Image (cartoon, rainbow, N blue to C red):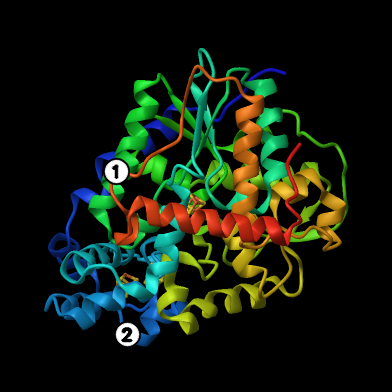
Amino acid sequence: MQMATMKNDAHQENMRMKRESSPLELDLPSALEQVNNLCNDCGACVKNCAFLQKYGSPGQLAKELADGSAANLSRAYECSLCGLCTTLCPQGCDPSGMFFQARRQANADLGDDKRHGVLRNYEAQGTSPRFTWYALPQDCDTIFFPGCNIPGSRPEIVKLLFQHMQQVIPNLGVVMDCCCKPSHDLGRTDFFREMFGELRSYLLDNGIKKVLCACPNCFKVFSMYGGGLETEMVYALLDANELPQAEKVTGEVCVHDPCPLRNESAVHEAARSILRKKGLKIAPQRRERKKTLCCGEGGAVPCMAPDLAKKWPEIRVKDIQGRPLVTYCAGCALFLGRHTPTHHLLDIIYKPKETLDGRVKPAPSPITYWNRIQLKKWFQRNLPAEAARERSLPYGASGESAGGAGFKGALFAFAGGLLCGFKKIK
Ligand code: SF4
Ligand code: SF4
Ligand code: SF4
């Protein structure tokens, strides 16, 4: 099989520019100034967003945020950080960026909010020695970074996908770790910088040049902060080569593009091309690609304002008029799947008929923790590595000690194993 990638100069230039304007180099006063100067209260963004409908236009909110009060800063945790307002604004305002800066300021002033504890713990597990595994074979310059959700919910598919990509990239390595996007979005800037910075340095020091992501959030983090590393979604690679499973199906679906990828037109196209190759027709919608919606889970809004989070799937459900949805983010598939039948593209690739018939059930938590350990063991048995490691937390995530996170991880994994009859990956 010939290797074919989506590498092109325009994309690389785009990535370089994104990194140079890193949101971590900006601050709240500059974001407020931008919105104050440009927003004319036209309402184009407000029409589409329940958060703005509740609190007011970005221009009005910029004036309120300027007082720096805890109440006003904390409101930013009810914004999904989905970027739709920024895309729609005819004046070039970046309200999404402003709410991100408000979160950073809120975290600096007020510290961690206990309502985000579950998410912080999830990330602490993902970065702990128990769940991490780096395996870089000899002459490896490309790694697969599957993220946290897919290894837990679909470990067999991760195994098959890895083996398939090995046919294209024989020295492919694997890194099971968390990109720390949860901390990034919660405004925990120092923690994110330290954790992602250490991950990136390890990869660069070991000669890695390219990262293949299965999770849109991981892709976004590597694209924005992974200077020196080329980043690609696995769907671009899959589409550019022979698909792993030839079975075809018929039917019509709608596509939910994950909001972190709203500006990645090559990935939108790859996902649709794969669906067409599987035999499916794609019904167009009003809100897709660049104008896609949040699934509802974005920005950890369900922890703070579940009623606002639910508004997004309500709009999506109206748009699709009873057709099945396909998405390429495991988080979106889970959240939207509570409102309407929603399938992950990887399930369609590997088990198309079973998936469309509703017979494919991704593993739920805490089985996910058991699965991640089993998948790690499978990589340890099957991928000989020149460089390998588990990762140690440089300091306790969520204010916990690394030992505390480790104990909880062992407990979750045991409970998950009990629930699934200690099923192993062969
Ligand atoms: S939820 Fe999305 S559209 Fe609404 S303000 Fe936040 S980033 Fe903008
Ligand atoms: S679309 Fe732009 S100008 Fe109009 S209200 Fe929203 S931020 Fe302001
Ligand atoms: S963004 Fe990726 S690594 Fe981070 S929590 Fe989601 S799946 Fe895990």
Q: Which residue is nearer to you in this view: 160 or 85?
A: 160
The total of numbered circles placed on residues is 2
Indicate the quadrant containing the N terminus: top left, top right, bottom left or bottom right.
top right
The quarter of the rendering in which ligand 1 is drawn is: bottom left
First along the sequence among labels 2 and 1: 2
Q: Which residue is nearer to you in this view: 237 or 171?
A: 171
Residue placed under numbered mark 1 in the picture: 394
The quadrant where residue 12 appears: top left
Name the residue at 44% across, 64% down: 119
Name the residue at 31% across, 84% down: 56
Q: Secondary structure at mark 2?
A: helix
Q: Compared with residue 49, is residue 147 higher up or lower down, i.e. above or below?
A: above
Q: Compared with residue 261, is residue 199 higher up or lower down, i.e. above or below?
A: above
Q: Secondary structure at mark 1?
A: loop
User: Is residue 306 shown left or right of residue 89?
Assistant: right
Residue placed under numbered mark 2 in the picture: 55
Q: Which residue is nearer to you in this view: 191 or 19?
A: 191
Q: Confirm or reject: label 1 Cβ below 8 Å from ligand 3.
A: no
Residue 79 seen anywhere in this rendered image of the structure: no
Q: Confirm or reject: label 2 Cβ below 8 Å from ligand 1.
A: no
Q: Horizontal and vertical percent for residue 361? A: 76, 60
Residue 340 seen anywhere in this rendered image of the structure: yes
Name the residue at 23% across, 62% down: 104
Q: Name the amino acid type tagged 1.
A: Pro
For disc 1, the neighbor class at 10 Å (few under 14, some 14 to 19, many from 20) is few
Q: Horizontal and vertical percent for residue 326? A: 69, 58
